[in-house]
Image (cartoon, rainbow, N blue to C red):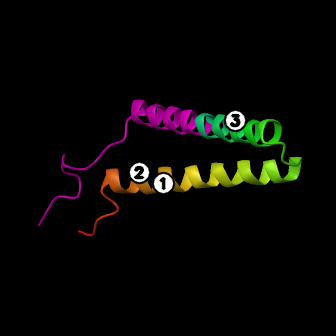
Amino acid sequence: MADPLSDDRIVMTDRDATDGTRTVITGGVIIAVLGAGWFVLSHFVMDTSTSDAIGEALGVAFGLLVLVSAVGAVVSGRGSPR
């Protein structure tokens, strides 16, 4: 019978939590900047209406979030059955 308090368990340190938070914030900022850039491109360069440009920018941000989620699932190994 395995000891539930053995040393093979995963322990999250404060540094791991800080690195994860930093990654989430950095990713959020990158997605926000790309969404804002898409809004500027759509509204000012292609002369679309403001509401259409906002809709497109939100669609791009959502698409990027889905892409990042899928890549993260595959990289972490959660995307494959065990």
Q: Position of residue 4 (x, y in %)?
A: 23, 58
The magenta stretch spans residue 7: yes
**40 vs 7: above or below:** above
Outermost residue, front side: 46
Q: Residues within 10 Å of mark 3 (few under 14, many from 20)?
A: few
**8 vs 34: above or below:** below
Which residue type does callout 2 highlight?
Gly
Asked if residue 44 lies left or right of residue 4, the reply is: right
Residue depicted at 72% across the width and 47% down the height: 57
Residue depicted at 62% across the width and 34% down the height: 29
Which quadrant of the figure has residue 46?
top right
**78 vs 65: above or below:** below
Residue depicted at 29% across the width and 65% down the height: 80
- Dot 2 falls on a residue whose secondary structure is helix
Q: Are marks 2 and 1 in contact (CB under 8 Å)?
A: yes
* Disc 2 from disc 1: Cα separation: 5 Å
Which quadrant of the figure has residue 81?
bottom left
Say which of 8 and 47 sits in front.
Answer: 47
Q: Residues within 10 Å of mark 2 (few under 14, many from 20)?
A: few
The count of marks equals 3
Say which of 39 and 74 sits in front.
Answer: 39
Residue depicted at 59% across the width and 55% down the height: 63
**Which of the marked residues, 3 or 1, is nearer the chain's N terminus?**
3
Asked if residue 26 lies left or right of residue 44, the reply is: left
| Span shown in magenta | 1-28
- Dot 3 falls on a residue whose secondary structure is helix
The residue carrying mark 3 is: 37
The residue carrying mark 1 is: 69
**Which of the marked residues, 2 or 3, is nearer the chain's N terminus?**
3
Which residue type does callout 1 highlight?
Ser
